């Protein structure tokens, strides 16, 4: 069924989607999947699209910022690997939490493209204070030095660090700094 016929039959214009991926095979697979549904029309140029669908290996801070800078009104990200800090990376760029490629099926993808991405999970997001704490720890600052630089007590720093470790399932401050570095947050 052509997209023009789908529009006439359902009375709803299909959502225009631009697919972006550095992996040509993934882009071709997603494009083929979407071409078989009347609710979605794949367009070659993202300026003509309602939704930018980005298929990535792993979402890093630079990719998230680049995607946000495209100016697309709605951005959906599918990632091969999604780890615990991915929601924070996405939130800092104003993106929804990426879907794991293994969890995507045609029905779920089409529903997401038509209805929009899920709302960001606030409990899993790094705030500015968390980032300051991680940056200072990455620079080798002690708890006392962090407290002095952030104008708070050592107890407040320890509590903030504990909350950060607990929220992301990290074991200690070295693990937190290493993970933030690998994720492109620092």
Image (cartoon, helix red, strand yellow):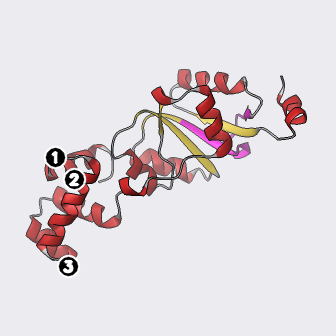
Residue 151 position within the rendered picture, expressed as x and y whole percent measured from the top left: 20, 79
Query: Would you call the spot at circle 2 few (<14 residues within 10 Å), some (14-19), or many (20 or more)?
Result: some
- Check whether the beta carbons of the residues at disc 2 and disc 1 lie within 8 A of each other: yes
Residue 45 position within the rendered picture, expressed as x and y whole percent measured from the top left: 70, 39
- Going from N to C along the chain, the mark reached first, 2 or 1, is 2
Q: Which mark is residue 165?
A: 2
- Check whether the beta carbons of the residues at disc 3 and disc 1 lie within 8 A of each other: no
The residue sitting at 11% across, 70% down in the picture is 145
Q: Which residues are magenta?
A: 40-54
- Can you tell which quarter of the image residue 123 is in? bottom left
Residue occupied by mark 3:
151
The residue sitting at 19% across, 58% down in the picture is 162
- For the view shown, which residue lies furthest in the bottom direction? 151
* Distance between mark 2 and mark 1 Cα atoms: 6 Å
Question: Of the residues tagged 3 and 1, which is closer to the observer?
Answer: 1
The one of 24 and 132 positioned closer to us in this rendering:
132
Q: Is residue 176 above or below residue 43?
A: below
Q: SS for tag 1?
A: loop
- Can you tell which quarter of the image residue 156 is in? bottom left
* Distance between mark 3 and mark 1 Cα atoms: 26 Å
Residue 118 position within the rendered picture, expressed as x and y whole percent measured from the top left: 54, 47
Q: Is residue 97 above or below residue 37?
A: below
Query: Would you call the spot at circle 1 few (<14 residues within 10 Å), some (14-19), or many (20 or more)?
Result: few
The residue sitting at 65% across, 34% down in the picture is 110
* Distance between mark 3 and mark 2 Cα atoms: 21 Å
Q: Is residue 79 above or below residue 159?
A: above
The one of 62 and 133 positioned closer to us in this rendering:
133
- Going from N to C along the chain, the mark reached first, 3 or 1, is 3
């Amino acid at each position: 069924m052509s997209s023009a016929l789908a529009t006439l039959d359902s009375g709803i214009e299909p959502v225009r989607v631009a697919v972006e991926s550095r992996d040509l095979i993934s882009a071709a697979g997603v494009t083929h999947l979407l071409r078989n549904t009347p609710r979605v029309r794949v367009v070659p140029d993202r300026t003509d699209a309602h939704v930018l669908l980005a298929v990535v290996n792993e979402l890093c801070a630079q990719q998230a910022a680049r995607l946000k800078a495209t100016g697309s009104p709605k951005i959906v990200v599918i990632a091969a690997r999604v780890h615990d800090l991915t929601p924070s990376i996405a939130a800092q760029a104003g993106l929804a939490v990426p879907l794991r490629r293994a969890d995507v099926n045609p029905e779920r993808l089409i529903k997401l493209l038509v209805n929009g991405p899920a709302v960001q999970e606030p409990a899993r997001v790094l705030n500015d204070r968390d980032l300051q704490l991680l940056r200072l720890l990455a620079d080798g600052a002690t708890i006392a030095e962090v407290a002095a630089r952030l104008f708070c007590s050592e107890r407040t720093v320890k509590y903030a660090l504990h909350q950060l470790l607990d929220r992301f399932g990290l074991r200690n401050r070295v693990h937190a700094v290493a993970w933030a570095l690998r994720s492109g947050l620092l």
